[in-house]
Amino acid sequence: MTPVPFGPADGCYAPPHSRRSPDFRANSMKSTLPRKRTALSARIKEEAQRLGFELVGISPARLPPHEESFAAWLRQGFAGELGYMERTAELRRDPGALVPWAVSIVSVGMNYFTPHLRPEMTKNETGWISRYAWGDDYHDLMKQRLEALLEAIRAMRDGPIDGRAFVDFGPVLERDFAGVAGLGWIGKNTHLISPKKGSWFFLGELFLSIELDYDRPIRDRCGKCDLCLKACPTSAFVGPYILDARRCISYLTIELKGWMPRHLRPLVGNHIFGCDICQEVCPYNVKALPTSEPAYAPRAGLYAPDLIPLLALTEQEFRSRFRGSPILRAKRRGFLRNVAVALGNIGSVEAIPALIHAFNEEEPLVRGHAAWALGRIGTAEAVDALRRRLGSEKDAHVRSEIGEATSEAEKSCAVGSD
């Protein structure tokens, strides 16, 4: 499933054949069309950059180069519970099925990087939220900018233009199109990498009904580097360019809606929403520049947040605190599950009262992961709380979690008393 290398044909467009006309005026008009396309394409890129898109390129609306690899990835089950991938597979593989009238695709990238360093995981009860979620939700902002770009293009050109914008939520293989449009290449960590700007970019696409000049793709420049593959705490990369989402920390803390697999919980560390590790170690991100977009600046309390107060958030407080943030995607139950796992991995006794209080939660998912965390901390107080809760717990899955956590905590207490 290694991606097919982009060849010269991927970035070039062959116009349809037409009969030669002896009419000099017709030939003169025809000869001006490429110049008009070139001028319009340049103006589109200038306007896109003015709107805040640092990366912009144009490609024909063709089958994405890795659509067969994507289908194979789905067949092997690497998508996990991402059912929407399966449901929209055909649309992702064929832009003609998604937007039949599309001729060209303008791919854009918007920088979201902020250079706050990752704190080491210590006994301090702080968690890690992926950089992309520190600020406002990028979906609405980028969609508005792309729609503004569409209106600007319509003003640039006489005649009607159909256009449709996509930002992440749409069934589009966006990294494929961005690669063909020359924004970068798909790296071994499956992120799109720009040789000069790195990979801290949100991607979006504007499908257009007009023919434009097309950019050439960039060759893969990962070379022999495999830092990203080795750095993944959960060994989520089956190989270069192939991610098993079921093991990915971002999947486990955002997309997975149910119980986190027990054998992966210790590997998640203090991550409570997303990860970033495979991008942090990428050499092309060493000189990444900070974003100039104010909306992506870190909100208060989202950089290395204190975990214990988060575990006490009510539904209303959760929605209020993260209004307009991508974190809402995990929902409260999933987010508190992640917080409990992180506290268990940190292992601080300061978290015990908050974890015990989480047994009052209505959500079994939160109660069960709080029990696991207490088992990891493994003090006498934790054992006592687990035993008491087992007597009143009604949910079978939570009871199972409490039983295993109690056994683990009792072993820790026995070792500690030796």
Image (spheres, grey):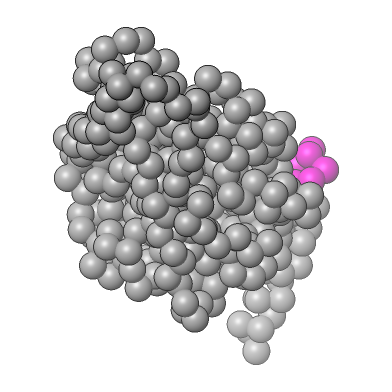
Describe residue 93's horizontal placement relative to residue 301 as left or right. Answer: right
Relative to 134, 345 lies left or right: right
> Is residue 396 rendered magenta in the image?
yes
Image coordinates for residue 37, horizontal then vertical, percent? 30, 31
Quadrant of the rendered image containing residue 115: bottom left
**Residue at horizontal 64%, vertical 54%?**
245
Viewer-side residue, 5 vs 241: 5
Residue 156 place in picture, x, y as percent: 22, 19
Image x and y of residue 64, in percent: 57, 44
Q: Nearer the viewer, residue 240 or 81?
A: 240
Front residue of 343 and 9:
9
Q: Which residues are magenta?
A: 393-399
Q: Quadrant of the C terminus?
A: bottom right
Give the residue displayed 22% in from the left and 37% down from the top. Answer: 42
Q: Residue furthest bottom?
A: 418
Number of residue marks: 0
In this view of the protein, can residue 176 be seen by the observer?
yes
Q: Where, quadrant-wise, is the N terminus in this rendering? A: bottom right
